[in-house]
Amino acid sequence: MSSRFIFPAVAVIAFGATQLNAQTLDNALQSAGTEYRERIARAAEELNRTRARVAAEKLPLLEQMQEAQNRIIAAESETTRLETRREDSTEQRRKLMLELEAISKTTGYAATLARDGLKVTVEGLAPGEDQFVGEQARSLQTQLDEAGADARSAAALDAVDFLLAHTEHALGGYRAEGRAMINETREVLPGTFAFVGPETFFRPSQRPAGTVRPREGAKYPISYSLASWQAEDADRFFSGQPGMMVADASGGKALRLKETTGNVWQHVRKGGWVALGIVGVGLLAALMIIQKLRDLGRMAVDDRATVAACLDLIASGSLTEAEKAVNALKRTTRELFTVGLRYAGQPAAILEERLQAVLLEQRLYYERRLPLLAVIATAAPLMGLLGTVIGMVKTFALITVFGTGNAAKLSSGISEVLVATELGLTVAIPTLVVHGFLAHRIQRNLSLLERYALEFTTSVQTAKVAARDQPNQESVPA
């Protein structure tokens, strides 16, 4: 069946159904309209009641909202104020931190200055002044070194107060009771110190006053009596009255130089046992030099003219006159010519051997101990060098332990180890010079004697030849 027939059929059926139910639908519509009108009325009433309730509650809510807005505005204002205060507090804190840092730096600088001032004060204390303020100054130094950041300021102030008080006290000089060692007796005696600028004076009881100098590593200073300081002037000075005082223009350097020099024995002892050995060798060399100078004085050799006159007498065969001339000669030449005259009648070879024996005997006698002097002149510097090396080893051992903080002490130690070298050269130089002088003079005299011996032999042979040619003349005995 086609669709063109279906749709009309459905429409007819639907129309019919509609007509059949039309009455029922109207009733339903009326009933629904009534119900909806009632519901709309109830809704309107509910709306009116709600509006009335909203109107009744609106004013308190508006008041509450206004109050809340006011609180919000107040809170915003307080927030702004607090933020401003926070920024101000932050800025104030930053400024305070900068001030605190500046104060900390100032405190540290003050503490450093106080520490340096205490160090300078302790190092610059006058001789004997350590008994009065040294302990307090070192205690303040310890406090500054060990104090924390909080206590450093108080410790620095204490140090500054101490330095100011000490400076005020030292201005114009002052007196104090203490103890010092007397240089002459090495006794530690009580007495009165007088501190006047860079000078310190000490007057023990029942002893003359003197100037005071420090002793390194010792508790008490040393006092040197001033003989040129009149007792009346010293009494007025120590009693605070105007008077004359004796001052050291060198600032104590003259006394320190005198202490450093000492006497000869103290100077030798600085070189140790090697220096003592050098001194012993030097004394031995001095004794031998004295002996050799005496030998050289006894080794008298005549001049060429005197010997020539004697040789002419021998060559001419005048033995009597020759013996008289030989006896008038000096000792060494006389000994040689006496032996020559004794063996003049012997053959030339025997005469030469006799004269050579005399020369050898004289050489052995007069050159004895000369080699030992040469050995001493050579060994003395080596002994000095040995003493210096030993001393330097000890000095460097001390440097290894204690460091090089004290240059004056180190230089003093080095100067002491050079004492051995000084003594070695002191012994070697004169010994070497005297040895050269003695060797030269002895060798010159021996050379002259050898020459005289040859000329004596020649003169004897000349006399023998002349005696053979002229048998009637006095001849040399066969």
Image (cartoon, rainbow, N blue to C red):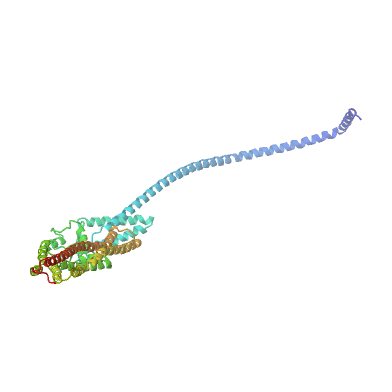
Q: Nearer the viewer, residue 438 or 196?
A: 438
Give the x, y percent position of residue 22.
Answer: 85, 32
Quadrant of the image containing the C terminus: bottom left
Q: Residue at x 86, y 34 (%)?
A: 21
Number of numbered discs overlaid on the protein picture: 0
Q: Residue at x 38, y 55 (%)?
A: 149
Give the x, y percent position of residue 301.
Answer: 14, 65
Residue 436 sits in quarter: bottom left
Q: Nearer the viewer, residue 123 or 94?
A: 123
Up the image or down, 36 lies above or below 308; here it is above
Residue 308 sits in quarter: bottom left
Q: Is residue 267 left or right of residue 155?
A: left
Give the x, y percent position of residue 473.
Answer: 8, 68
Q: Residue at x 45, y 44 (%)?
A: 85
Q: Nearer the viewer, residue 4 or 380?
A: 380
Give the x, y percent position of residue 411.
Answer: 28, 59
Quadrant of the image containing the N terminus: top right
Answer whether residue 108 is visible to the viewer in this image.
yes
Residue located farthest toward the right when viewing the structure as drawn: 1
Up the image or down, 109 lies above or below 136; here it is above
Answer whether residue 186 is visible to the viewer in this image.
no
Q: Nearer the viewer, residue 390 or 318?
A: 318
